[in-house]
């Protein structure tokens, strides 16, 4: 196991073309996540949280700077290697569950494992374990439309860790839930991260939930700075 930080972003720049001008979202952004750290990213809408998470998750490339994942510099890495690294090392949870509507909860957890090469029987076993762990085992055969918002997000969280990633990136994972459900789902997420020694970067607007993390950061003029909610 590498002793390098799970994630290290260095002087990252990301701008979007807006007509004739550049909208600079990240500009010299630095962030390092040590193994097992749980960090909240708390910043207003439009400040670049999703952009930062997409870069960290290797879904996009920065225009300058470097993203190191598990000590590996990823800039210019061939697509197939990026995809493999993302698939095995990184899990993503979004504000909306993005589960496949025509598949059951169990199947939604089996598919990413089978794509990663896990035999079907093992994938099913792990899917069951994860759903039980997240206390939705009895909903395993239901499709997303037959689940409540909180249950859908639990399944999405379970799916994100189905391939046992080391880094979990969550983009306002409870932003779409009512306050009580949000607190319960967040507690489950927290327990999962702590129990498995995962490293997590979680964008949230909720200061109360953010205070439970090891530390909080925000975005200020395209840079990552410490934040004390
Ligand atoms: P947050 O997640 O904090 O709400 P985002 O990272 O989604 O912020 O967006 C930051 C800024 O970049 C916003 O002004 C947004 O409109 C802009 N932006 C995000 N993605 C794109 C894109 N693909 N093309 C153009 N502008 C974008
Ligand atoms: Mg966002």
Image: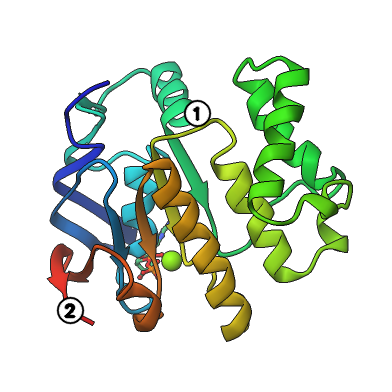
Please indicate, yes or no, whether residue 145 appears anywhere in the rendered image. yes
Q: Residues within 10 Å of mark 2 (few under 14, many from 20)?
A: few
Q: Position of residue 5 (x, y in %)?
A: 19, 36
Alpha carbon distance from label 1 to label 2: 33 Å
Q: Position of residue 201 (x, y in %)?
A: 34, 55
Residue at 73%, 31% in the rendered image: 110
Q: Earlier in the sequence, mark 1 or mark 2?
A: 1
Quadrant in which residue 81 is drawn: top left
Residue at 70%, 47% in the rendered image: 131
Q: Is residue 43 left or right of residue 105?
A: left
Element on which disc 2 rests: loop
Give the labeled residue for mark 1.
Answer: 87
Element on which disc 1 rests: helix
The image quadrant where one finds ligand 2 is bottom left
Asked if ligand 2 lies within 8 A of label 1, the reply is no
Would you place residue 78 above or below residue 5 in this image?
Answer: above
Give the labeled residue for mark 2.
Answer: 228
Q: Position of residue 119 (x, y in %)?
A: 71, 14
- Count every numbered label the image shows and give the total: 2
Where residue 114 is drawn, which disc sits there?
none
Quadrant in which residue 226 is drawn: bottom left
Q: Position of residue 151 (x, y in %)?
A: 72, 63
Q: Residues within 10 Å of mark 1 (few under 14, many from 20)?
A: many
Q: Nearer the viewer, residue 127 or 78?
A: 127
Q: Is residue 65 left or right of residue 161?
A: left
Would you place residue 156 above or below residue 148 in this image?
Answer: above
Q: Quadrant of the C terminus?
A: bottom left
- Asked if the residue under mark 2 is in contact with the one under mark 1, i.e. CB atoms within 8 Å, the reply is no
Residue at 85%, 61% in the rendered image: 145
Please indicate, yes or no, whether residue 19 appears anywhere in the rendered image. no
Q: Quadrant of the N terminus?
A: top left
């Amino acid at each position: 196991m590498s002793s390098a930080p799970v994630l290290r972003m260095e002087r990252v720049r990301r701008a979007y073309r807006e007509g004739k001008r550049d909208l600079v979202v990240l500009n010299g952004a630095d962030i390092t996540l040590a193994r097992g750290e749980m960090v909240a990213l708390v910043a207003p809408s439009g400040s670049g949280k999703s952009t930062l998470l997409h870069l960290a998750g290797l879904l996009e490339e920065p225009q300058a700077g470097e993203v190191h994942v598990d000590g590996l510099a990823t800039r210019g890495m061939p697509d197939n290697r990026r995809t493999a690294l993302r698939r095995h090392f990184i899990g993503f949870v979004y504000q909306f569950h993005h589960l496949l509507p025509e598949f059951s909860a169990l199947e939604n957890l089996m598919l990413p494992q089978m794509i990663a090469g896990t035999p079907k029987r093992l994938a099913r076993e792990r899917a069951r374990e994860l759903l039980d762990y997240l206390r939705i085992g009895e909903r395993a055969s239901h499709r997303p439309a037959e689940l409540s918002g909180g249950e859908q997000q639990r399944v999405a969280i379970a799916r994100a860790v189905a391939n046992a990633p080391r880094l979990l990136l969550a983009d306002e994972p409870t932003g779409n839930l009512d306050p009580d459900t949000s607190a319960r789902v967040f507690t489950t997420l927290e327990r999962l991260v702590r129990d498995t020694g995962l490293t997590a970067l979680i964008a949230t607007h909720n200061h109360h939930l953010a205070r439970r993390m090891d530390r909080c950061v925000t975005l200020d003029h395209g840079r990552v700075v410490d934040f004390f909610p």
